[in-house]
Amino acid sequence: MTGRRAYLDFNASAPLAPQARAAMMAALDVDANASSVHGDGREARRMVEQARRDVALLVGAQPEHVVFTSGATEAASMLLSPQWMMGRAPLRMARLVVCAADHPCFLSGGRFDADMVSMVGVDADGVVDLAALEALLAGHDREQGLMLVAIHAANNETGVIQPVAEISRLAKAHGAVLVVDAVQAAGRIAIDITDGWGDFLILSAHKIGGPKGAGAVVGVSDLMMPAPLVRGGGQEKGHRAGTENIAAIAGFGAAAKLALAGLEEIEAVRAMRDAFEASLLELAPDAVIFGNKAERLANTLFFAIPGVKAETAQIAFDLAGVSLSAGSACSSGKVGPSHVLKAMNVAEGSVGDQGALRVSIGATTTKIELDAFTSALAGMMRRRAARINAA
Ligand code: PLP
């Protein structure tokens, strides 16, 4: 809870964990550059390498296969490149496949020209169309170069979990490279990059209790790597130049450690999310919950209420001291129609057109916050009833 407000927007940014804050404060007290060879420099390096081990552990990777970036968007831009290296030999990715419900950091296509990008859809439950993906993979001419598949593991709006193991099996069978956006999945479902999670993951610190502006590319190996996006010095073994942001990286590492331990509390988070859902359905029995027929993250509830515009409801919640999102609203504070609902073919004229609201919580969410949500929603439902009666 932020002050006396109810903070229900963890998928946009989870609150900074006290352990991450402490690690950042300690790192801010180190004056040196992590590349300096003196004692102070070695202390800075120690902090970066500790964080690398903790981030690697969260996803079952080797620490040497973690490349720190300024966030998941940069990690995506680094990986979504037609130019790669296999050791010293150049390697070309001829086509990129993204999913219609991906985050914009994948949908934008990274460094691929638009005509090199194909898109697979999702079904009404938000799950990727595996048959369409297989057809794209099977139809690709490998003589032209490899195919790169970029798909999210868990959706930031609906929380829907994709069949990553099956996607990984298909990609492997057709010789494609798979990049998985594990930003929302990390700390919410167990991830083992060596077991059906593709070739590369992208991660973001601020979704797991770390600071904004830190993320990582994590590989199952480093035999094959994309051409660097940020060029300059030899930091991050030449994969990402620029002096390391030691405080942000240290905060990310501490958050990763906590996120791994937090997997044990996920059933308590699910029980709390289910309490929000029960409260919603009690006050608005006609509410539509998106993605609830698929496997969903335990912390996410994405819904629409007939006769209630999401933007107006968000303002009403805000005035009542409840922070939640309308749509994903993750760029520039703008609320537009959800591309995820569109991809799920939520019919024109249905509740989805009024926009949807997202409650996303974590292990620190309290009953007081649930009560704040319930009481704000009850007011909204009374106003809706009055409007209907007056009409
Ligand atoms: N991928 C998903 C699924 C996200 O939810 C987000 C953030 O909203 C990102 C990628 C981008 O992460 P970052 O904010 O670190 O660039």
Image (cartoon, rainbow, N blue to C red):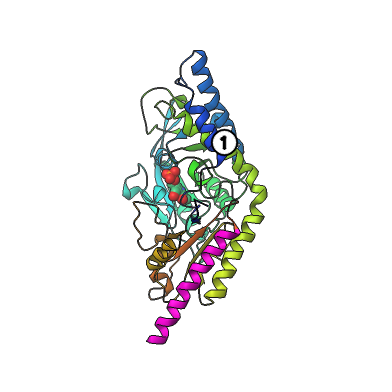
Quick check: is 139 in the magenta stretch? no
Q: Which residue is drawn at 37% across and 47% down?
A: 109
Quick check: is 390 in the magenta stretch? yes
The magenta segment is 367-391
Q: Can residue 219 be seen in this view?
A: no
The percent position of residue 61, horizontal first and vertical second, equals 59, 36
Q: Residue furthest top?
A: 38
> Would you say the beta carbon of the disc 1 residue lies within 8 angstroms of ligand 1?
no
Q: Name the residue under label 1.
A: 254
370 vs 103, nearest the viewer: 370
Q: Is the magenta stretch mostly helix, strand or loop?
A: helix
Q: Is 14 placed above or below 341 here? A: above
The percent position of residue 7, horizontal first and vertical second, equals 50, 55
The percent position of residue 112, horizontal first and vertical second, equals 35, 44
Q: In this view, does 83 lie to the left or right of 2?
A: left
| Element under disc 1 | helix
Mark 1, other Cα within 10 Å: few <14 / some 14–19 / many ≥20: many
The percent position of residue 73, horizontal first and vertical second, equals 41, 43
The amino acid beneath tag 1 is: Ala
Q: Which residue lies furthest to the front in this view?
A: 4
Q: Is residue 233 visible?
A: yes
1 vs 63, nearest the viewer: 1
How many numbered circles are shown?
Answer: 1
Quadrant of the rendering where the C terminus is positioned: bottom left
Q: Which residue is drawn at 39% across and 64% down?
A: 315
Q: Is residue 331 left or right of residue 32?
A: left
